[in-house]
């Protein structure tokens, strides 16, 4: 009698039941990156300063990767009012390594008053900060920082 057959059946059943039908490629979750305590990239992130709020509207690719990335962000006041006459600059930086990216991203205001950030160059996996320097009208500039872990 073959005693291995029932054990194989149990293992196969556990494997099939454990797989489920979840899609892990739609939106990132904290348990899908290697450094959730640092901060996994969230495709719906928002970040604030004392006056401003930035919200990610879209990203290409959906999850950031080494090389060129493009993000579309919405800028509002903290009370969710739309803002005009603002200048936005973005600077990627790796605080654990003490360096930034090889080039400054290009930021353009869209006709819908959102901001398209192109050529965000991430050169290696690890902790990244994207610092947005925002100045609206005659007010002093404020920084909004979004930090996340870039996977290998």
Image (tube, rainbow, N blue to C red):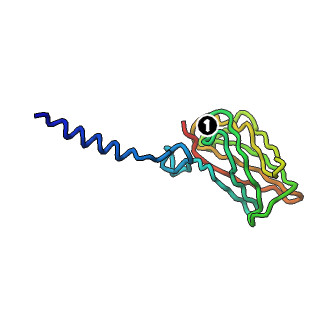
Percent across and percent down for residue 76 are 77, 59
Image quarter for residue 69?
Answer: top right
**CA neighbours of label 1 inside 10 A, class few (<14), some (14 to 19), many (20+):** some
Residue located farthest toward the left when viewing the structure as drawn: 1
Q: Secondary structure at mark 1?
A: loop
Query: Which residue is nearer to you in this view: 134 or 7?
Result: 7
Percent across and percent down for residue 133 are 77, 50
- In the image, residue 128 above or below residue 50: above
Residue under the point 60% across and 35% down: 124
The quarter of the rendered structure image containing the C terminus is top right
- In the image, residue 86 above or below residue 69: below
The quarter of the rendered structure image containing the N terminus is top left
- In the image, residue 98 above or below residue 53: above
Residue under the point 24% across and 38% down: 8
Residue 123 is left or right of residue 134, and the answer is: left
Residue 122 is left or right of residue 13, and the answer is: right
Residue under the point 81% across and 44% down: 108
Percent across and percent down for residue 126 are 57, 40
Image quarter for residue 143?
Answer: bottom right
Q: How many badges with numbers are in the image?
A: 1
Residue under the point 55% across and 39% down: 151
Residue located farthest toward the bottom when viewing the structure as drawn: 79
- In the image, residue 41 above or below residue 121: below
Residue highlighted by disc 1: 65
């Amino acid at each position: 009698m073959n005693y291995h057959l029932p054990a194989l059946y149990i293992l196969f059943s556990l494997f099939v039941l454990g797989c489920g039908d979840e899609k892990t490629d739609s939106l990132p979750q904290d348990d899908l990156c290697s450094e959730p305590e640092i901060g996994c990239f969230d495709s719906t992130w928002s970040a604030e300063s004392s006056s401003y709020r930035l919200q990610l509207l879209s990203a290409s690719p959906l999850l950031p990767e080494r090389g060129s990335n493009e993000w579309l962000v919405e800028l509002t006041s903290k009370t969710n009012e739309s803002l005009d006459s603002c200048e936005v600059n973005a600077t990627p930086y790796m605080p654990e390594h003490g360096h930034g990216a090889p080039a400054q991203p290009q930021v353009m205001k869209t006709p819908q008053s959102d901001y398209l950030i192109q050529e965000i160059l991430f050169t290696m996996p690890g902790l990244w900060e994207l610092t947005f320097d925002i100045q609206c009208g005659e007010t002093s500039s404020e920084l909004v920082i979004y930090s996340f872990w870039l996977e290998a």
